[in-house]
Amino acid sequence: MPGPQPEPIELSDKARRDLEKLAARHTTGQQKAQRARIILKAAEGKNNAEIARELKQSIDMVRLWRRRWHELEPIAWDDLSAEERLDDLPRPGAPSRLTAD
């Protein structure tokens, strides 16, 4: 028996173009490029298991980034770019005592 269907992701033309550029750009970190690919596949209507299989990622990773994308949807595109939406969250703990100097 199939599980619950994930919430669909709908992208504007600008959002889709920005994510495609981010995924294809050679200077983009591989984590962000992979996250962009996850969102693009989700916007195609694929479920989490299909995306995980195609991109060779865990289902939990796909589920995480789909959920985070939905959480950031209410924020206007001009206020938060595609790259900023795919950033890691700040890590807990004390700040580092070592500096670049």
Image (cartoon, rainbow, N blue to C red):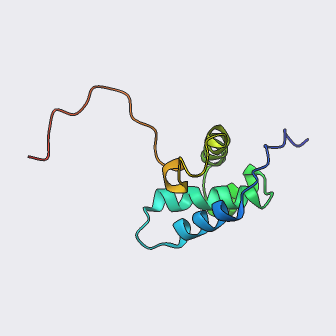
Q: From the viewer's perspective, tell me whether residue 43 is left or right of residue 32.
A: right
Q: Is residue 63 above or below residue 37?
A: above
- Give the camera-side residue of 20 and 55: 20
Spot the residue most to the top: 94
Residue lying at 65% horizontally and 63% vertically, measured from the top left: 14
Q: Quadrant of residue 91?
A: top left
Residue beneath the point at 40% across and 69% down:
27
Q: Residue at x 81, y 57 (%)?
A: 45
Q: Residue furthest left?
A: 101
List x then y, in percent, for residue 57. Answer: 60, 55
Q: Is residue 47 left or right of residue 83?
A: right
Spot occupied by residue 34 in the image (x, y as percentages of width and height): 55, 60
- Pinpoint residue 3: horizontal percent, then vertical percent: 84, 39
Location of residue 17 with respect to 97 vertically, above or below: below
Q: Is residue 19 left or right of residue 93?
A: right
Say left or right for 29 vs 56.
Answer: left
Question: Residue reaching furthest front?
Answer: 78
Q: Residue at x 52, y 66 (%)?
A: 22
The mark tally for this picture is 0
In this rendering, the answer to whether 31 lies above or below 13 is above
Q: Position of residue 56 (x, y in %)?
A: 61, 60
Image quadrant holding the N terminus, namely: top right
